[in-house]
Amino acid sequence: MEYIGIDIGGTAVKIGIIDENGTVLASGHYSVNFDRYETPILDTVVKSLGIFLSKYSVKSVNLKGIGVSATGQVDIHTGVVTGTAGHIKNWKKSKIKETLENRFNLPVAVMNDANCAALAEKWIGGAKEVSNAVILTIGTGIGGGILVNSEILTGSDGLAGEIGHFTIHCQGKPCTCGNTGCYEQYASVTALIHMVTEAVDKGLFPKSAFQDGPINGKTIFELLAAHNPLLESIFEEWLDYVAFGLVNLVHIFNPQLILIGGGISVQETLFIKPLRQKVHQQVMPAFGKGLSLKAAALGNEAGMIGAVYFYKKEFAKQTLR
Ligand SMILES: [Zn+2]
């Protein structure tokens, strides 16, 4: 018996058939923003899942259930989207659990995507052997999950671990969440690109260094690898922000492990190693003892894998009750 794992993001929904061990046996992805969300995402998800199941000739009776990882704030008890940090039209109030259960006649468990990605690392990834970890995905924004005594920290409704939106500047930049000075406004890849673009616009940095190409994560790391001193100083400033946030988290949660996910986590020499050094320099010595920091093990299938793990844990709990 297998499971369906679904990862609903802002641009696409990924769907996979996943076995008891977390192996993805087949997967597909479908656009959710093809008409700028005029078609509600949940309608697209229902339609896509129907297409996916018939493509692989999978019948509901042969499946155990569906685990869903979803963007935004999702109430784990009701499976309803209760909030979003950005502005995705027709998404808030979507009844994911109820809709999918009725349509596909299978039990469904839903959790926010960052917590699902963290759970996947605990199940089959880099946090398998540890009980206390902070798992952070650095990309367009910052997402995260906190592992406490081998369980994901859910808070009262499953919203805990919204790491991108704790404030590190009390009068800082406005954020999509409505607050100001949020961590992701300073420590995401988007923030790094802004810092470099700003330096270029102010004439502090020659655009020619990028050979008139785009300024993005990839080109920034290419230039860093070539030891551009001005870019190195901007990068250092950005890295300080990333480290400051992590030091706060270490002092609050006392993890054994910090896992960094997202495309840039493959940059061991330029990013992970100096970040590890900064965090170790800044935490109180007792917190640094035995603390490791490394790149997350799983890629973009983490959301759907973690969603299935969450499903398994939820329904195991119900059987015990
Ligand atoms: Zn925010």
Image (spheres, rainbow, N blue to C red):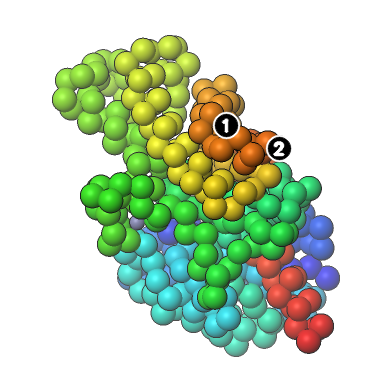
Q: Secondary structure at mark 2?
A: loop
Residue at 64% from the left image edge and 62% from the top image edge: 152
Residue found at x 61% / y 60%: 116
* Residue 139 percent location from the top left of the image: 45, 44
* 234 versus 162 height, above or below: above
Mark 2 beta carbon near ligand 1 (under 8 Å): no
Q: Is residue 138 above or below residue 34?
A: above
Residue 50, placed above or below residue 12: below
- Quadrant housing the N terminus: bottom right
| 213 with respect to 225 (left or right) | left
Please give the residue where the numbered disc 1 appears in the rendered image.
280
Q: Position of residue 68 (x, y in %)?
A: 60, 68
Question: Are the two marked residues, 2 and 1, in contact with CB atoms closer than 8 angstroms?
Answer: no
**Between marks 2 and 1, how big is the CA–CA gap?**
10 Å
Mark seen at residue 272: none
Packing grade of label 1 (10 A; few <14, some 14-19, many >=20) is: some
Q: Position of residue 53 (x, y in %)?
A: 66, 70
Between 37 and 206, which is closer to the camera in this rendering?
Answer: 206
Q: Nearer the viewer, residue 91 or 141?
A: 141
Instruction: Look at mark 2 in the image and give the residue it sits on.
Output: 290
In the image: residue 156, left or right of residue 229: right
Look at 75% across and 70% down and name the residue there. 312
Q: Quadrant of ligand 1?
A: bottom left
Q: Amino acid at mark 1?
A: His
Q: Is mark 1 within 8 Å of ligand 1?
A: no
Which one is earlier in the sequence, the residue at label 2 or at label 1?
1
Q: Amino acid at mark 2?
A: Gly
Q: Residue at x 43, y 76 (%)?
A: 82
* Quarter of the figure with residue 224: top left
The picture places residue 136, in percent across and down from the top left corner, at 54, 47
Indicate the secondary structure of the residue bearing disc 1. Answer: helix
Q: Badge 2 local density, few (<14 within 10 Å), some, or many (20+)?
A: few
